Amino acid sequence: MKLDILVFGAHPDDAELGAGGTIAKEISLGKKVGIVDLTRGELGTRGSAEIRDQESAEAAKILGVSVRENLRFRDGFFTNDETHQLEIIKMIRKYQPNIVLCNAIDDRHIDHAKGSKLVSDACFLSGLRRIGTKIGEESQLEWRPKLVYHFIQWKNITPDFVVDISDYIEPKTDAILAYSSQFHDPNSNEPETPISSKTFIESVHYRAKDLGRLVGVDYAEGFTVERMVAVDSLDHLI
């Protein structure tokens, strides 16, 4: 299956938190979008890997993605080496996306920056025909995405561009809240974490509102780029 956009996240819920509105919007425009989670989030303080599996499947349904896979890298301990790069390359060649979205270039959680660089490096290497990969017995052809964009997570990184998600804040929020084990629950006996606070979801909305305010829309999501952004004409700027 060829996808238009492939989203990589170090953990289940990274894609929803960083780019859930953009994912929902692009799907509404007829794009085929998939998500690949690098780990199962098994080191998370709350819930379990099995619960996160169920939650990520529900979030995928809410957003309407075409496919979601999990590479089962070791949470907290995966590295940017040949073994991990080859697994990412297999996904890129399998789905042949034009655009890849991935983790923030710098963030509070060490897996986010690691995952960001790992995916970025694999996107380049995937275009080299002398790197051989197979899925099953079938050899894969080289494929390099045209564009790699990095969403923004915990840290307030200044975006290079934003996407208007004013009509898609609801599915973004619903997809995030599908991870009920991770966020505020007054009846939970599990330890508190930075994202389980009462105000965390409010902060997600606040950032989207603030980025929207800066460009004259209700809500927006921000991304950083790896090369200069170009537009066909000035009319494409909002």
Image (cartoon, rainbow, N blue to C red):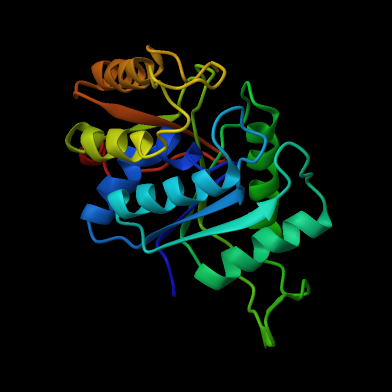
**Considering depth in this image, is 162 or 198 the residue closer to the camera?**
198
Quick check: 233 above or below 93? Answer: above
Residue 148 seen in the figure: no
In the rendered image, the quadrant that contains the C terminus is top left
In the rendered image, the quadrant that contains the N terminus is bottom left
Quick check: 91 above or below 14? Answer: below
**Considering depth in this image, is 114 or 235 the residue closer to the camera?**
114
Q: Position of residue 32 (x, y in %)?
A: 34, 63
Which residue is painted at 64% across and 26% down in the image?
109
- In the drawing, does residue 133 fall left or right of residue 208? right
- In the drawing, does residue 149 fall left or right of residue 23? right
- In the drawing, does residue 205 fall left or right of residue 109? left
Which residue is painted at 28% across and 55% down in the image?
27
**Considering depth in this image, is 142 or 55 the residue closer to the camera?**
55
Residue 48 image-quadrant placement? top right
Quick check: 238 above or below 57? Answer: above
Which residue is painted at 49% across and 28% down in the image?
152
**Considering depth in this image, is 105 or 236 the residue closer to the camera?**
105
Residue 234 seen in the figure: yes
Q: Position of residue 38 (x, y in %)?
A: 62, 49
Which residue is painted at 24% across and 16% down in the image?
213
Q: Position of residue 44 (x, y in %)?
A: 62, 32
Number of numbered discs visible in the structure rendering:
0
Outermost residue on the right side: it is 82
Residue 192 image-quadrant placement? top right
